[in-house]
Image (spheres, rainbow, N blue to C red):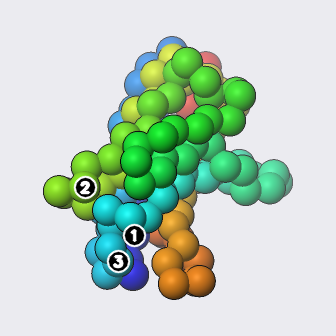
Amino acid sequence: VQLQASGGGLVQAGGSLRLSCAASGLNFRINSMYWYRQAPGKQRELVASISSKSTTNYTDSVKGRFTISRDNVKRTVSLQMNSLKEEDTARYYCYTDFRGRDFWGQGTQVTVSS
């Protein structure tokens, strides 16, 4: 299983970014997919998830600003991030579990400046 994340960068507060994660080596359609983030000195936290039926969940701090989506044909999961805040600065990771094992992407850095 490979997860390849992309789309991070430097953006001013209030701006937008779209992260994408391309998955291979698993039955993508039946897997729930997740975005996590980790800021320096902080624990990794779950940001958003999307089930195989496209049911979504978000951590409270991003509700109304972030949108997770999936494309089962392209085998990608995306995270549209709007109204970004300085506290959204972190390395963002896509994650899934498959056959009892955890799989993480390499992460993509998001930096929000004031």
Camera-side residue: 9 or 27?
A: 27
| Camera-side residue of 113 and 91 | 91
Q: Is residue 38 left or right of residue 56?
A: right
The kind of residue on which mark 1 rests is Leu
- Of residue 92 and residue 86, the one placed in the foreground of this image is 92
**Disc 1 and disc 2: Cα gap in Å?**
14 Å
For the residues labelled 2 and 3, the Cα–Cα distance comes to: 12 Å
Q: Residue 22 in the image: state x and y as whole percent.
A: 30, 62
Secondary structure of the residue carrying numbered label 1 = strand
Q: Position of residue 12 (x, y in %)?
A: 49, 22
Q: What's the residue at 40%, 48% (across, down)?
A: 53
Residue name at image x 71 percent, y 28 percent? 60
Quadrant for residue 27, please give it.
bottom left
Does residue 63 show up?
yes
Most foreground residue, 77 or 17: 77
- For disc 3, the marked residue is 26
The residue carrying mark 2 is 72
Residue type of the residue flagged with mark 3: Leu
Disc on the earlier residue, 1 or 2 = 1
Q: Mark 2: which secondary structure? A: loop
Q: Quadrant of the N terminus?
A: bottom left
Between disc 2 and disc 3, whose residue precedes? 3
Q: Which mark is residue 93?
A: none
Measured along the vertical axis of the image, is residue 60 above or below residue 77? above
Q: Earlier in the sequence, mark 1 or mark 3?
A: 1
Per the image, the residue denoted by label 1 is 3
Quarter of the image with the C terminus is top right
- Proximity of marks 1 and 2: CB atoms separated by less than 8 Å: no
Horizontal relation, residue 114 to residue 98: left or right: right
